[in-house]
Amino acid sequence: MKMATPSSIALLGLKGSGKTTYLAALWHLLEAQELKTRLKVRSLQLDREYLNAIRSAWLAFEPVPRTSVKIDVRVDLLLEGESSHDLVDLSFPDMSGESYRLQWSLRRAKPEYANLAPSIGGVLLFIHPEVVGRAQRIAGETQIVSMSPGAVGVQVPSAKEWKADTAPTQVQLVDVLQSLVFLRRRSEPMRVAVMISAWDPKSTLSKLAPMYWLESQMPMLHQYLCSNSKMLPTSVFGISAQGGSYDSDRNILKKQRVASDRIQMRSLEGQDLGHDLTIPLDFVLGQDVAPLLDLEASEPAE
Amino acid sequence: MSPERQCVQDQCEVSSAGNCLEGFLPAAACPYRRGERSAADPQSKQPLFIDLPSGLALSPIEANNIARDVHARVILLAGDHESGKTTLLTSIYESFQEASFAGFSFAGSQTLLGWEERCHDGRLSSGRSVPHTEHTKVGDGLKFLHLKLSEMRTSNVSDLLLADVSGELFRRLRDSAAAIDSFQALRRVDVLCAVMDGERIVKAEERFVARNNVRALLRSLKDANVLQGRCHTSVVVSKWDAIVASPDVEEISGFVQESFALYEREFPGVTFSSVAARPRAKLSFAHGVATLLRNWCQDSPSSPSPVDVRSLFTGLRHFERFGTVGV
């Protein structure tokens, strides 16, 4: 059995993207050991209050509490590979989505995050399909208007001032990754697992392979990841940590005898990966358990 | 008089009631507090936040640092006031938001906020019903936007630094050797793109001025001998949709043909393009821009000589297929 290799995995994603829900479900999966997983927890984190609180909300079919920008939540787990028995001392800083918004709009990073960045070996990048902001161009006649004093021309009624928050989600996520690369200051590759949340079996999403969703719904982010595949080898997962909507599927979810069975996952190409939320972790830790995203492989779905 | 807002979050009452929405105590520690960049904790003296690169358009010094490190190509657009320079640039960025473009994939940018700011008035989020582009102000100084592109065929990466010169600076460069001499960025330019406004070409009383303004700029730069040997010069007719839609197509065709011939005689090696970055009708968004971008990324772009503009007016279907001169 090898000595534990310390590694940090960053959970990245904007507000409401599903990071904390994933963490809650993952903690239950690891701690309850209801199912076989690729990674298992070797010893419990000393302070488990936060993990147990979010896990309880998850078990009770309640939305997990929002991570405040004030609270610096950090999860430390000693994990063991199921087959290899290799140990990994895994650390997750659970940055709030607001913290990433802060980075984008105010260009400020929390010192804790900046200090941890050089040790980050991989990234789980969360996206919630229902919380994606898009750029929508105005169709119609172009009107170029001079705004300089004394200019003669068509006067345009006052419009909304630009705010960084209006930027499309895909642009903000590219910036999140670029900022991490900047803070990390390392040349070694950093694996990225794109986690598309709310990938519920009954939703129309599940009829599409996750990689096609990313390509069609976030084309700039898709291009960025493919173009930087040497530095950021990437795979894509469709994740349902809740197992469905708490509003419409609660009664069905309650009938599950094993809570971990709620969890659903799809691979980049849409294959059923079962309930094991440690697969994306295993991928970012360097195991070849998932195919890589690549421009040539991705084609628009019919 | 209401207290100046101390917090960027609209719903925070720290300015009026002293209570930080995020619960920071003291409130000065809150990351949403205006100003006070890189403030330090008074007890530990450790910085409260780490500054990230601004993400806004780059100053010439910042652009020079990138150009030096990654051998970036510097593209400068110059043209009359409101000739469509900034719109042309933003159409490139907006195209990458939708898909790979011109045979390239988006590989990153150090000026994402700069791009977003310039695109804002062309989007629904601006609250406008008609797209608008705020003109480049001379008081802002020369600013560069950055794009890193990966060529899909070869995976080669290109860094582009793109700047549009304000109409006022364009006039100064055209009219004054001293202005050229003091404009240091010219010495590092890889592609000089002189933009001729299609909407002015359509108007008989303005087209000759528009043509001559471009010619005068190219002549001034040639006389001053400031452009480096490998710098490529191109002339781009913007707002091509205005020309397509004009009832005087024959007359305009002849004028454009003559203009290109004049430029070719006086400035051998110059190439020509026509674009409609944000057309009104008939043409698709960023019409002709893909070819222009490909040319910018080539070491020795070219267009056939002599240039035949007639092909652009033989019918819309033909025109849409051959949207730029010389391709």
Image (cartoon, grey):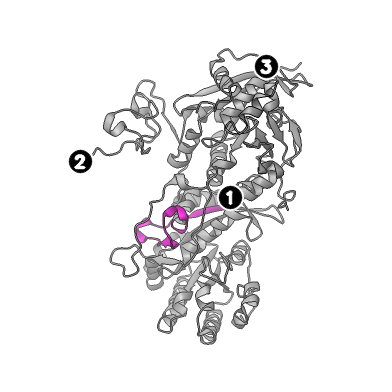
In primary-sequence order, the first of circles 1 and 2 is: 2
Disc 2 crowd rating (10 Å Cα; few below 14, some 14-19, many 20+) is: few
Q: Which residue is mark 1?
A: B70
- Nearest the eye: A259 or B246: A259
Q: Is residue B60 visible?
A: no
Q: Is A281 inside the magenta-drawn segment?
A: no
Residues under numbered marks 1 and 3 in contact, where contact means CB atoms less than 8 Å apart: no
* Image mark 3: chain: A
Secondary structure of residue under mark 2: loop
| Residue at position x 56%, y 48% in the image | B69
The three-letter amino acid code for the residue at tag 1 is Val
Q: Do discs 1 and 3 belong to a common subunit?
A: no
Q: Do discs 3 and 2 belong to a common subunit?
A: no
| Residue at position x 41%, y 72% in the image | B174
Residues under numbered marks 3 and 2 in contact, where contact means CB atoms less than 8 Å apart: no
Residues under numbered marks 1 and 2 in contact, where contact means CB atoms less than 8 Å apart: no
Which one is in front in this view, the residue at disc 1 or the one at disc 2?
2
In x, y percent, where is residue A104? 48, 41
Q: Range of the magenta residues?
A: B121-148
Q: Which residue is mark 3?
A: A32
Rendered image quadrant of residue A281: top right
In x, y percent, where is residue B226? 48, 66
Secondary structure of residue under mark 1: helix
The three-letter amino acid code for the residue at tag 3 is Ala
- Nearest the eye: A161 or B49: A161
In whole angstroms, how far apart are the C-alphas of marks 1 and 3?
51 Å
* Image mark 1: chain: B
In x, y percent, where is residue A70? 44, 26
Q: Which residue is mark 2?
A: B1
Secondary structure of residue under mark 3: helix
**Label for residue A95?**
none
